[in-house]
Image (tube, grey):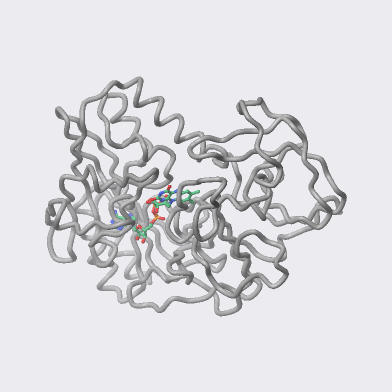
Amino acid sequence: MDSTLARLSEITNLTVSRDAPLSAYTRFAIGGPADIYAETESVESFIQALAAARASGRDYMVMGGGTNLIVSDLGFRGIMLRFVARRMLAAGDRVQCDAGAVLQDLVDFAIDRGLQGLETLAGIPGSVGAAVYGNAGAYGHSISERVRQVRFFDGECVRVFDNAECEFHYRESVFKRRKDWVVFSTELRLSPADAAALRQIAARDRAVSQHYSQFDYSKARLVRVTEPREVYVSYRIRDTIFWTSKKIRLPAGEMLLTDGKITARAKCGNQVSETAKPEVSDQEPEEDILDQPVALVGPSPSLPVRPGPPGFNLPIGPPPSSGAFGFPLVSLGGAPIGGCRLKDGLLEHCHPHKKPVAPEPGTIVLIGSGLAMVMWRYHRSRVLGS
Ligand SMILES: Cc1cc2nc3c(=O)[nH]c(=O)nc-3n(C[C@H](O)[C@H](O)[C@H](O)COP(=O)(O)OP(=O)(O)OC[C@H]3O[C@@H](n4cnc5c(N)ncnc54)[C@H](O)[C@@H]3O)c2cc1C
C-alpha cells in the first residue's frame, strides 16, 4: 500500500490522498474511505496513475460524478481514480468537452451559444464522461445522437472513435463493455437554434428533476404515518410537475420517504406537503391518479411518465411481502459491498473482475421511478411522529 501511495505521489499533477471518505464524492453522500483516492486534470498523469494502479495488483476503479456509485460504509479497499478536466470549447456547431465536466454545465454551455441538441439532457446528474459511457438521455433523446467522436484510453494508448465505433445503444456503449477503457473527451455536433427557446425546453425538463433535487439523500429514511394526515400532493403529467390545491388524506400505516424536509409517498413517488404549494395546475387530477405509482416496470396508463434512469425501473428481488408498496422495496441479505453500482437488479462491484454482490444484511434498497434510488440501513428507519 505504502509503495503504491509513494508511486502515485511521484506523478506530477496528480492529487493523491489516503483514506479519502467517498461520501464526499458520491451523490448519495454515503460511503466509507477509499484506501487511495487520486484525481487529475491531466491525461498523461491519469494514464500514469492507471498504470500504477494496475501494477499494484490492488482493486481500482474510475469514477465520474459518483451518481451511480453506492459505497459501503466500510469503504473501498482499493484505488479510486477520477479524471476531473472540465474544458469546453465551441467552434461553429461543434463543441468539444472534457470527460470531467458536469453534464449540466455542458448543457448550459451549448444553450448559451444557441446550440441545440443537448437541452433534453438538462437535469441528468453526473459527468460528461459517464454520460458517454452510459449513453445518458431523457425524453426520447440520448447524448449519442450528438456525439461525433470520443477520445479515450484503451489501456495501451489514446484512441479516437467516431460515433459508429462507439456502438451506442439505449444506455449502452462500447465503453460500458470495456471496463478498462477511460473516456477523456468527446466532440459533439449540434445545430444552431434560438437560445431562448432552448432555455425554455431545458427549464421544463429541469422542473421534473428539480422536484427532488433538493432531497438530501444522506438523511433519507423510511417512515410510517402513525396518525392520518391531510396533505397537498404533487403529481407528474408528461414533463411537468403539478401541485394540487386540494387536500388528500394519508391513512395511518402509509410509508413515506423523507429527508426531514421533503417527503414523498413510497407507494407512488409523489411529493406531499402539509402547506399548500403555489398552484401550477390548471386542472386537478382524480384522486385515484394521485395514488398510482409514477412508474413501475412500465409507465402507468393514466399518468404517462418518462422512463426512469438505468436500473431504476427493474423488477428486482422478491416481491414486497406486505404488498404495501407501489414499487419494489426489497430487503436483501449478503456480504458487505465495496464500490458498487446497480445493474440488472444486482449491486455490481465496479472492479471488472469482481462478481456482483448483495448489500449488507438489513439494507433496504428502494427502487423508485427516477426520482430516487436510496440505499440506507434499516436502523435509520423510524416512525413518523413517534
Ligand atoms: C436522481 C437521478 C436521476 C437520473 N436521471 C437520469 C436520466 O434521466 N437519464 C439517464 O441517462 N441517467 C439518469 N441517471 C443516471 C446518472 O445520472 C447517469 O448514469 C450519469 O451518467 C452518471 O454520471 P456520473 O458521472 O455520476 O457517473 P458515476 O456514478 O461516477 O459512474 C458511473 C459509471 O461510469 C463510469 N465512468 C465514469 N466516468 C468515466 C469515464 N471518464 N470513462 C469511462 N467510464 C467512466 C464509472 O466507472 C461507472 O461505472 C439519474 C440518476 C439519478 C440518481
Residue 86 is left or right of residue 208, and the answer is left
Q: Position of residue 141 (x, y in %)?
A: 32, 44
Q: Position of residue 87 (x, y in %)?
A: 25, 37
Is residue 242 positioned above or below 320 on the image? above
Is residue 61 positioned above or below 67 on the image? below
Name the residue located 24 percent from the left edge and 67 percent from the top edge: 178
Q: Looking at the rendering, in which quadrant would you find the C terminus?
A: bottom right
Residue 75 is left or right of residue 14, and the answer is right
Q: Looking at the rendering, in which quadrant would you find the N terminus?
A: bottom left
The quarter of the displayed image where residue 78 is located: bottom left
Whether residue 29 appears in this view of the structure is no
The quarter of the displayed image where residue 325 is located: bottom right
Whether residue 171 appears in this view of the structure is yes
Q: Decide which of 4, 119 is in the foreground and name it.
A: 119
Residue 245 is left or right of residue 283, and the answer is right
Is residue 176 positioned above or below 141 on the image? below
Q: Decide which of 215, 306 is in the foreground and name it.
A: 306
Name the residue located 14 percent from the left edge and 66 percent from the top edge: 156
Q: Position of residue 371 (x, y in %)?
A: 54, 48
Q: Position of residue 348 (x, y in %)?
A: 43, 71
Name the residue located 24 percent from the left edge and 40 percent from the top edge: 97
Q: Decide which of 296, 373 is in the foreground and name it.
A: 296
